Image (cartoon, grey):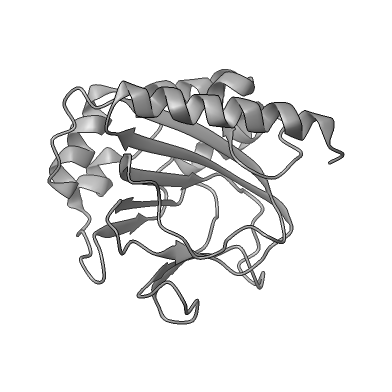
Amino acid sequence: MSMIDLDSFRAKTLESDPFPYLVLDNFVQPELAAEIGRDFPDIGKGGSFDLSTVSPGPAMQALIDELQGDAVRDAFAAKFGIDLTDRPTTFTLRGMSREKDGRIHTDSKTKLITVLIYLNADWQDGAEGGKLRMLRSPSDLEDYVAEVSPGFGTMVAFKCVENAWHGHKPFVGQRRSIQLNWVVSEEAVAASRSRHRISAFFKKLLPA
């Protein structure tokens, strides 16, 4: 049984204004919330953690394995019109959000597609912050075309173009997600992994 709903992803219309993006609820099957919540690594600090620095449990690892499969790659390649053949991937996890997180930014030029999958079974939609906004500019968080609540199984994906601005209002607390990127080369993978490993080392020295 698949852990994700690729059929709904294939059927979903890709938005183009102001950049190519797509939002899909229940991309991860809702009935898996308890298993994945149990097997999400214990990440008690902010920032992104490369998979090599954490230990996912069986259900989380199964989700990651499926996301690495050819069917997912081919579906995203077709949707975004990018040839992802032989393009490597990176995976990072977030467990906590800090006051400073969510500032408006675009992703690295070495990334081709960003996929964010939120894994928060108890997320309260009434929370003031933490909802990702797809933005028209780098300077106005209120000028958004979509706002994504990070509830369990919700997925947002976008093409990493120069105007793919996104961010969210500050939120402090648990905000779990997995980020998948197709990147330009193995050198980009190595650079990302090295950067996150160094970051993880210093995070271990700091209090939660």
Q: Is residue 41 visible?
A: no
Number of numbered discs present? 0
Q: Position of residue 112 (x, y in %)?
A: 27, 42
Look at 55% across and 43% down and name the residue there: 177
Please identify the residue farthest to the right as the structure is shown. 207
Answer above or below: position of 24 versus 35: below
Q: Seen in the image, is 51 located left or right of residue 204?
A: left
38 left or right, relative to 73:
right
> Residue at coordinates 26% horizontally, 47% vertically from top-left?
9
On the question of residue 174 being in view, the answer is yes
Q: Quadrant of residue 190?
A: top left
The image quadrant that residue 24 belongs to is bottom left
Residue shown at the point (50%, 65%) measured from the top left: 104
Image quarter in which the C terminus is found: top right
Please name the residue shown 83% across and 37% down the image. 206
- The picture places residue 102, in percent across and down from the top left corner, at 58, 61
| Vertical arrangement, residue 133 with respect to residue 161, above or below | below
For the N terminus, the quadrant is top left
Q: Position of residue 96 (x, y in %)?
A: 69, 47
Q: Nearer the viewer, residue 53 or 177?
A: 53
User: Residue 166, percent across and down?
Assistant: 44, 63
Query: In this orientation, which residue lies closer to the viewer: 118 or 152?
Result: 118
Name the foreground residue: 74 vs 121: 74
